[in-house]
Image (cartoon, rainbow, N blue to C red):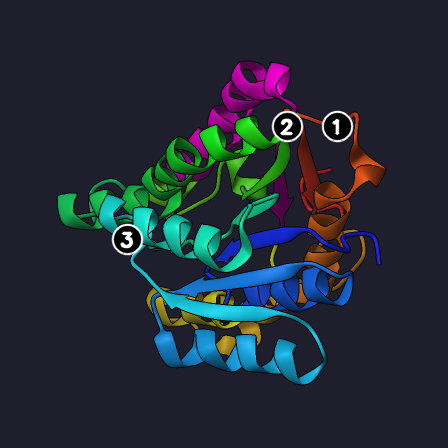
Amino acid sequence: MRLEGKKAIVTGGAGGIGRASSLALAAEGAAVAVVDLNADAAEAVAAEIRTAGGSAFAVAADVSAEADIERVVATAMSEFGSIDIVFNNAGIIRRTTAVETTVEEWDRVFGVNVRAIFLMCKHVVPLMAAAGGGSIINTGSGWGLKGGGQAISYCASKGAVVNMTRALAIDHGPQGIRVNTVNPGDVDTGMLRDEARQLGQAESGFLSEAADRPLQRMGQPHEIASVVVWLASEESSYITGAAIVADGGGIA
């Protein structure tokens, strides 16, 4: 129980990596606020945690909206009394080039992938600092460290996440707050399958290409969740400002 007594917020917590991470954090003893745009799906994950003997509640929120972030943080403080861990995981992808991307799509991708992290940190950091510290984990991507095709807004947003994380680590390390990114490669989630649809490709062929990496397979959500738990725990107590890559060797 590496996180016994800790209180966590997970955004995008209802599916894929977010769901797996919510369950993994709870299994290690953390109480979890499961935040997602899909209220029913968030409640299902929170109920799953409670059924297993853990503590969790669900919050429906658009993480790109400051009022929603303020409500999430206030609810977590009311329910938990403190916030020790934040996993800023909510994210979206649009598989388009610069020419094909609309301004509205660009703004939405940056709203969910970048603005949401800024807003969460803006409102959580003072609470963590007052309590003596905490751990913030942001979901980056292998494409936040190298380029990728037909995903300009996503690549730009994830590059911003990686460097914003470094800036946060520098600013708030003296307050005992560690800030890191976990950077997955292709992970077997609904979001990955949606990319095939966006590109007009057959899902089977798309997933086969996603497995083309040294470990010769896609990642599984629980494998990313294990990195999140480690970054949330004291086992990573001297790690901050780091971009941890979990991609089966994809960018090697």
Q: Give the labeled residue for mark 2.
A: 132
- Most foreground residue, 104 or 229: 229
x, y percent for residue 126: 46, 29
User: Around disc 3, counting alpha carbons within 10 Å, would you say few (fewer than 14), some (14 to 19), or many (20 or more)?
Assistant: some
Helix, strand, or loop for circle 2?
A: loop
Looking at marks 3 and 2 on the same chain, the residue that comes earlier in the sequence is marked by 3
Position of 96 compared to 78: left or right? left
Which quadrant is home to the N terminus?
bottom right
Q: Distance between the residues labelled 3 and 2?
A: 25 Å
Helix, strand, or loop for circle 1?
A: loop
Position of 166 compared to 151: left or right? right
Specify the amino acid type for callout 1. Ile
Looking at marks 3 and 1 on the same chain, the residue that comes earlier in the sequence is marked by 3
User: Around disc 1, counting alpha carbons within 10 Å, would you say few (fewer than 14), some (14 to 19), or many (20 or more)?
Assistant: some
Q: Give the labeled residue for mark 1.
A: 239
- Most foreground residue, 175 or 95: 175
- Most foreground residue, 104 or 231: 231
x, y percent for residue 46: 54, 75
Specify the amino acid type for callout 3. Asp
Placement of 117 over or under 207, stated as above or below:
above
Q: What stretch is highlighted in magenta?
A: 156-185
Q: How many marks do you count on the picture?
A: 3
